[in-house]
């Protein structure tokens, strides 16, 4: 049975979604909207519904400021490094490493923002719409929030169906989120960029698999997720939700938010590990 993947909306003449995509990209300083938003947009009307709620938080810089506070506090063993000699022997030269660095910088910047945003949306869809609000006022912006300069990857993001079978299996092996039978497969955008660098994902898997087996990756993921949930809850209290504004295909969107609420912190942790593992001049990522 052929694999099927999460649907994404990439229709260029969908003016409303495209305008939201452009705002998301500009306000987080990256080149394109995240997979979670492209997937939400596959349901007509769903992304505008979400943006009416989280858009003001992005415009005030609240999502970004919250997201960039939740970088994982990880203590990694010295062996969690890519030896430069080994990289060279495997054909991962300096230009290839620069491609990996740029891709990691993009997603290490935007994934924390994505996690905060979907946490806010999930709270709105869950308990927030059915409880008494605390009437926490949204802060009035004193001045326009200025996003950081954009980072643009120098790799191509492969379409899921264009990823070679061996690479697709490798991505599954290093994923904590295993697709259930019949469930659409989820290939994170970061891996779709790194798949454009020959040899990089196999080397990355050698680094990640021991952390998976020892449970360290899962521990880091849970720490990041819990930190993000606290920030999302704080921001959700500032949002007024129109009572009669119904979300299209609500059940599908809630399932997506739950799945990504685990996948995104996983990719935050993976991105940080891989970025630290690269030889100098790669250092710890600065999101701001």
Image (cartoon, helix red, strand yellow):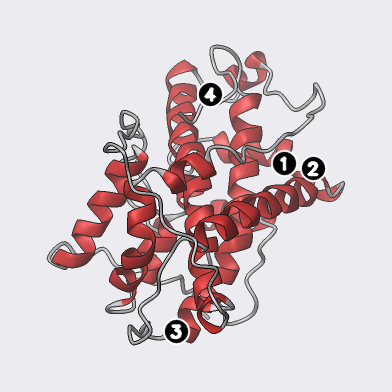
In terms of depth relative to the viewer, which is nearer, 172 or 17? 17
Q: Residue at x 29, y 68 (%)?
A: 9
Q: Earlier in the sequence, mark 1 or mark 4?
A: 4
Q: Which residue is mark 1?
A: 208
Q: Residue at x 58, y 82 (%)?
A: 182
Which mark, residue 140? none
Q: Earlier in the sequence, mark 3 or mark 2?
A: 2
Mark 1 → mark 4, Cα distance in angstroms: 20 Å
- Callout 2 secondary element: helix
- Callout 1 secondary element: helix
Q: Earlier in the sequence, mark 4 or mark 3?
A: 4
Q: Residue at x 47, y 82 (%)?
A: 252
Q: Do the numbered discs 4 and 3 sit on residues whose CB atoms are within 8 Å? A: no
Mark 3 → mark 1, Cα distance in angstroms: 35 Å
Q: Earlier in the sequence, mark 2 or mark 4?
A: 4
Q: Do the numbered discs 2 and 1 sit on residues whose CB atoms are within 8 Å? A: yes
Q: Which residue is mark 4?
A: 91
Q: Do the numbered discs 1 and 4 sit on residues whose CB atoms are within 8 Å? A: no
Q: Which residue is mark 3?
A: 250
> Could you tell me residue 215's position as x and y percent?
84, 50
Query: Which tag is nearer the camera, tag 3 or tag 2?
Result: 3
Q: Quadrant of residue 127?
A: bottom right
Q: Which residue is mark 2?
A: 211
- Callout 4 secondary element: loop
Mark 2 → mark 4, Cα distance in angstroms: 25 Å
Circle 3 crowding by C-alpha within 10 Å: few under 14, some 14–19, many from 20: few
Q: Residue at x 37, y 66 (%)?
A: 53
Query: Which tag is nearer the camera, tag 4 or tag 3?
Result: 3
> Could you tell me residue 181's position as x and y percent?
63, 80
């Amino acid at each position: 049975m052929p694999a099927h993947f999460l649907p994404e909306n990439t229709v260029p003449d969908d003016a409303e979604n495209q305008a939201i995509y452009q705002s998301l990209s500009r306000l987080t300083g990256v080149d394109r909207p995240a997979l979670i938003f492209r997937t939400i947009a596959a349901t007509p009307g769903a992304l505008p519904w979400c943006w009416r709620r989280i858009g003001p938080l992005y415009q005030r810089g609240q999502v970004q400021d919250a997201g960039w506070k939740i970088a994982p506090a990880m203590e990694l063993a010295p062996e969690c490094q890519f030896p430069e000699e080994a990289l060279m022997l495997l054909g991962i030269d300096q230009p290839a490493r620069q491609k990996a660095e740029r891709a990691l910088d993009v997603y290490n910047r935007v994934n924390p923002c994505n996690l905060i945003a979907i946490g806010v949306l999930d709270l709105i869809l869950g308990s927030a719409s059915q409880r008494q609000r605390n009437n926490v006022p949204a802060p009035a912006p004193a001045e326009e929030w200025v996003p950081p300069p954009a980072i643009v990857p120098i790799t191509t993001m492969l379409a899921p169906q264009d990823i070679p079978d061996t690479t697709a299996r490798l991505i599954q092996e290093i994923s904590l989120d295993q697709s259930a039978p019949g469930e659409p497969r989820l290939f994170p955008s970061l891996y779709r960029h790194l798949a454009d660098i020959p040899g990089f994902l196999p080397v990355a898997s050698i680094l990640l698999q021991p952390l998976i087996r020892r449970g360290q990756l899962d521990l880091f993921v849970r720490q990041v997720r819990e930190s993000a949930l606290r920030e999302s809850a704080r921001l959700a209290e500032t949002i007024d939700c129109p009572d009669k504004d119904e979300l299209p295909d609500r059940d599908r969107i809630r399932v997506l938010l739950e799945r990504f609420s685990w996948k995104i912190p996983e990719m935050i942790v993976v991105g940080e590990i891989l970025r630290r593992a690269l030889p100098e001049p790669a250092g710890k990522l600065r999101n701001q």
